[in-house]
Amino acid sequence: MEITDIRVRRVTTEGKLKAYVTVTFDNAFVVHNVKVIEGKNGAFIAMPSRKTKNGEYKDVAHPISSEFRGKLQEMILMEYDKTPEETTAEIVN
C-alpha cells in the first residue's frame, strides 16, 4: 500500500492543533481528519477519532504497525512543513 496524496489544511486556533490532513492510499482509499498536533517534543499526528457514549475517544482508522505509523507520520509532517501558512483555514465551532 502506497500513500499517493497528502493534503494539508492548516488551522488558526490558538491551541495545539495545527492542521487537518487528508491522506489517499493507492489512489483508491482516503482517510480524512488526521490531525497535526504540536506537542512538548515537537509535532505528531493523531488519527481520526470519535467520542463514545462514555466520553472516551476511539480511533476510527489507524495504522496496525508502528513501522507504518512512523512512515505515515514522517510523510505527513514533511508535507505539513512544505505547506505555506497562507493555506490556513479558520475553524468555526
Image (cartoon, rainbow, N blue to C red):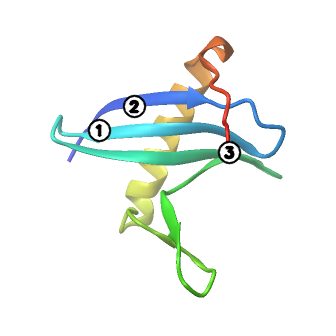
Q: Residue at x 49, y 38 (%)?
A: 21
How many neighbours does mark 1 have within 10 angstroms: few (below 14), some (14-19), or many (20 or more)? Answer: some
Q: Is residue 32 left or right of residue 12?
A: left
Sequence-wise first label, 2 or 1:
2
Q: Residue at x 67, y 28 (%)?
A: 90
Do the numbered discs 3 and 1 sit on residues whose CB atoms are within 8 Å? no
Q: What whole-number distance in Å separates the C-alpha atoms at marks 2 and 3?
A: 25 Å
Amino acid on which disc 2 is placed = Ile
Residue 27 image position (x, y, % from top left) = 18, 34
The kind of secondary structure element at disc 2 is strand
Q: Which mark is residue 93?
A: 3
Amino acid on which disc 3 is placed = Asn
Which residue is disc 1 drawn over?
A: 24
Q: Nearer the viewer, residue 13 or 81?
A: 13
Identify whether 67 is placed above or below 51. above
Q: Nearer the viewer, residue 26 or 18?
A: 18
Sequence-wise first label, 3 or 1:
1
Q: Residue at x 39, y 31 (%)?
A: 6
The kind of secondary structure element at disc 3 is loop
Which residue is disc 2 drawn over?
A: 6
> Which quarter of the image is occupied by the C terminus?
top right
Q: Residue at x 64, y 22 (%)?
A: 88
Q: What whole-number distance in Å separates the C-alpha atoms at marks 3 and 1?
A: 26 Å
Pick out the residue farthest to the front. 93
